Amino acid sequence: MAREETLTLAARTIAKASRVVAFTGAGISVESGIAPFRGRGGLWEKYDPAEYAHINTFRSNPEKAWILLKEMLTTVSAAEPNAAHHALAELEHLGKLRCIITQNIDSMHQRAGSSNVIEFHGSFRQFVCLDCARSFETDELMFDLVPLRCTCGGLLKPDVVFFGEPIPTDTLFRAESAASTCDAMLVIGTSAIVQPAASLPFIARKAGARVIEVNPEPTLFTELISDCRLVGKAGEILQRMVAEVRRIVQQEGLEDSYMLKSPGERSHADRDTGH
């Protein structure tokens, strides 16, 4: 199928769906200047995650873990949301995107204007003391001297999931609930390697959802569950896709009744579906 036909098919699938979920990985933030973890130019070419990104390293040798963390924090703090992030925010405003499940810890989706984001691996917005559990906003901390420590003397850890740590139970429940109740899932910029995150599109497909993949390279999703795949830069593809969704929605009156609810009614609906 030609690319234009595939894009139109994807847009029509989203426009006609009522419970669309986006599942995003590191690839969506590459156009913001944030390096992916895997593949050419990825962080894991430079840092062995088993050494630098494992919770045991953070606890026993935090100075080593902070070599990676400082580079990541510097990069994320200088980055801005790109066209792909903004396109998903617009899709939400059109009433066609119920929520985003992201593996990213950079908060780009929220900064672009998305309001319902499940951060599967946490974020850099807060740090938490490993001893007393006190939390600190990242903006109120100074990073001149690391590792950071709490006033109680305990290590301050970014509120992200390190290797060797489980996904928080509430986060896992919300993500699996969103995946199992959606009728279309946009899969963007993810390698289909990291578990348990990579299981979410399979949960969606098993529940009957259409899976639309936006990735530069084939993945396990491509082979097993994707109904259509769009190849190229996520920013360009999503901008064009959302423009087509907007045209279809306006032409055919396919606004999502969810977005017509009051904020209180939306909150109640989200609780009912685990969002």
Image: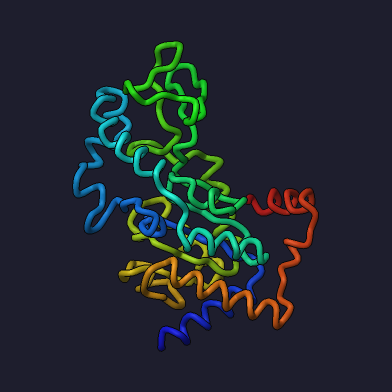
Q: Is residue 128 above or below residue 164?
A: above
Q: Is residue 28 above or below residue 106?
A: below
**Which residue occupies 52% across, 40% down?**
169
**Which residue occupies 31% across, 71% down?**
218
Residue in the foreground of this view, choosing between 54 and 177 = 54
**Which residue occupies 48% across, 72% down?**
212
**Which residue occupies 49% across, 46% down?**
107
The image position of residue 203, as x and y in percent, is 50, 61
Q: The N terminus is located in which quarter? A: bottom left
Residue in the foreground of this view, choosing between 159 and 178 = 159
> On the image, which quarter does residue 95 sit in?
bottom right
In the image: residue 158, left or right of residue 251: left
Q: Which residue ends up furthest to the top in the rendered image?
A: 152
Residue in the foreground of this view, choosing between 112 and 9 = 112
> On the image, which quarter does residue 72 sit in?
top left
The image position of residue 27, as x and y in percent, is 37, 59
The image position of residue 22, as x and y in percent, is 52, 61
Colour setup of the view: rainbow
The image position of residue 97, as x and y in percent, is 61, 63
Q: Is residue 12 above or below residue 213?
A: below
